[in-house]
Amino acid sequence: MGTVTQLKPSEDINIDLDRLVEVYEKMGATGNSDAVVRAVEHIEDQLVSISRLYHAGRFREAGVHADNLSCIAAQIGMDSLVSVATDVTVCAEASDTAGLGATVARLTRIGTQSLDAITDPPMSAG
């Protein structure tokens, strides 16, 4: 019997740090973290809803949630997440169930990595 290799797909993510800094500057010292925390929580909720709706066969609703997710992610500079959420919406609207399954899985990976990057950024040198 052969060896089983576990694949762990990883995605390249793009976060517009200038946009994120802009959000922080607009909100001021006290409101900035609250705004980003609310956006992150909303993104987490949308990711869970999209997956749940997809698995329940409610594809159009999953697409609506993906569209909402795209808008929120754009506000805080999560460019990769915006792109894939848009792809989910397109697949849902086109009733492309095979494409939708693949893009929902990709959305989950990119969503997780994007949230990790924004909530636990690497330590900067210096």
Image (cartoon, rainbow, N blue to C red):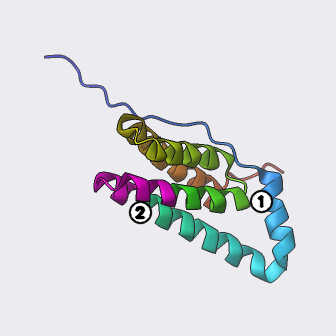
Task: Name the residue nearer the viewer: 84 or 18.
Answer: 84
**Circle 1 is placed at which residue position?**
20
Residue lying at the far left in this picture: please name it. 1
Tally the numbered discs: 2
- Identify which amino acid the numbered label 1 is placed on: Leu
Residue 75 or residue 65, whichever sits in front:
65
Indicate the secondary structure of the residue bearing disc 1: helix
Whether residue 28 appears in this view of the structure is yes
Name the residue located 55 percent from the left edge and 70 percent from the top edge: 41
Mark nearest the camera among 2 and 1 is 2
Magenta residues?
A: 50-65
Residue type pointed to by label 2: Ser
Q: Write down the quadrant of residue 21 in the picture.
A: bottom right
Q: Judging from the image, what secondary structure is the residue with disc 2 in? A: helix
Please tell me whether residue 59 belongs to the stretch shown in magenta. Answer: yes
- The residue depicted at 68 percent of the width and 47 percent of the height is 79
- Residue 49: assigned label: 2
Report x, y in % for residue 112: 51, 52
State the residue at coordinates (63%, 42%): 13
Q: Is residue 32 left or right of residue 115?
A: right
Q: Is residue 98 left or right of residue 114?
A: left
Label 1, residues with CA under 10 Å away: few <14, some 14-19, many ≥20: some
- Where residue 20 appears, as percent x and y from the top left, is 77, 59
